[in-house]
Image (cartoon, rainbow, N blue to C red):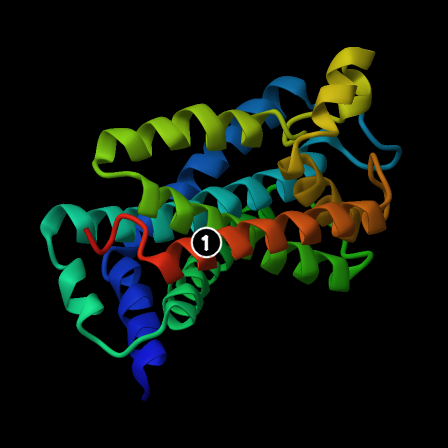
Amino acid sequence: MNGWQTLFYKEVWRFWKVAFQTIAGPVLTAMLYLLIFGHALEDHVKVYDLVSYTAFLVPGLAMMSLLQNAFANSSSSLIMSKVMGNLVFLLLTPLSYVHWYVAYVGAAVVRGVIVGVGVFAVSALFTHVSFVAPVWIVTFALMGAALMGTLGLIAGLWAEKFDQLAAFQNFVVMPMTFLSGVFYSIHSLPSFWQGVSHFNPFFYMIDGFRYGFFGVSDVSPWLSFAVVGVALLCVSALALQLLRTGYKIRS
């Protein structure tokens, strides 16, 4: 096992050791959303023909959980290493900045996908969800997890204490996630807010992911793929540059 694989294994083992908190907790939270919103709005909201509102919620909740946990994994790991002072041990290794990126983001993808699969598996007990285009499901799940894992890496590098990281998550990640169409179709919004939603990359991740289940979506999955792909390339380039220069990790 070489250096980056060891770091990757360490990052996966870090969240797996507390799986009740890092995996079971998010799955339970998503189930509460499903039960409450599904029960309250099932007979009052119709988004797509032949798709119940509860079924409509499932892909959105699975993707939301996936994105949030991918972000949390890489960001929390870095800030904990900074606060505890053990980041210096990684700096002493011959790992390159690319190795750091692959290990941290790779572990974030693993956690995000595990949580997303867990949410979907439990949701299947309450409603039936089809698989119209599985390739799109896998594509957007992996791209979304990688994007959020990379964004978490950037946030972890930038933050110097937990308060700053919490502010980033509460004022950037959470609003963009909840305003991305998890609980509704953007076509139900006024025209102004529909326009605003089209500037939210989280919307394209969730809309493209949902297309894989139902074969219908608010925008073309190819447009969603292009937007998410460009966003992933941009944040990856920024993260690699920050790691290469040792931003806030070598001072």
Relative placement, left or right, of 67 versus 229 is: left
The one nearer the camera, 155 or 68, is: 155
Residue in the image at 31% along x and 75% along y: 95
Quadrant of res 94: bottom left
Query: What x and y, as percent, mark residue 90?
Result: 21, 68
Q: How many marks?
A: 1
Quadrant of res 161: top left
The relative height of residue 24 versus residue 100 in the rendered view (above or below) is above
The relative height of residue 124 versus residue 133 in the rendered view (above or below) is above
| Badge 1 element | helix
Query: What x and y, as percent, mark residue 229?
Result: 69, 54
Query: What x and y, as percent, mark residue 145?
Result: 53, 54
The one nearer the camera, 67 or 74, is: 74
Residue in the image at 43% along x and 24% along y: 171
Badge 1 crowding class, 10 Å Cα cut-off, few under 14, some 14 to 19, many 20 or more, is many
Residue furthest left as drawn: 85
Residue 3 visible somewhere in the drawing: yes
Residue identifier under label 1: 239
Quadrant of res 108: bottom left
Query: What x and y, as percent, mark residue 85?
Result: 10, 53
The one nearer the camera, 77 or 39, is: 77
Residue 45 visible somewhere in the drawing: no
The one nearer the camera, 169 or 232, is: 232
Relative placement, left or right, of 122 versus 74 is: right
Residue in the image at 65% along x and 38% along y: 201
- The three-letter code of the residue at mark 1 reads Ala
Quadrant where the N terminus lies? bottom left
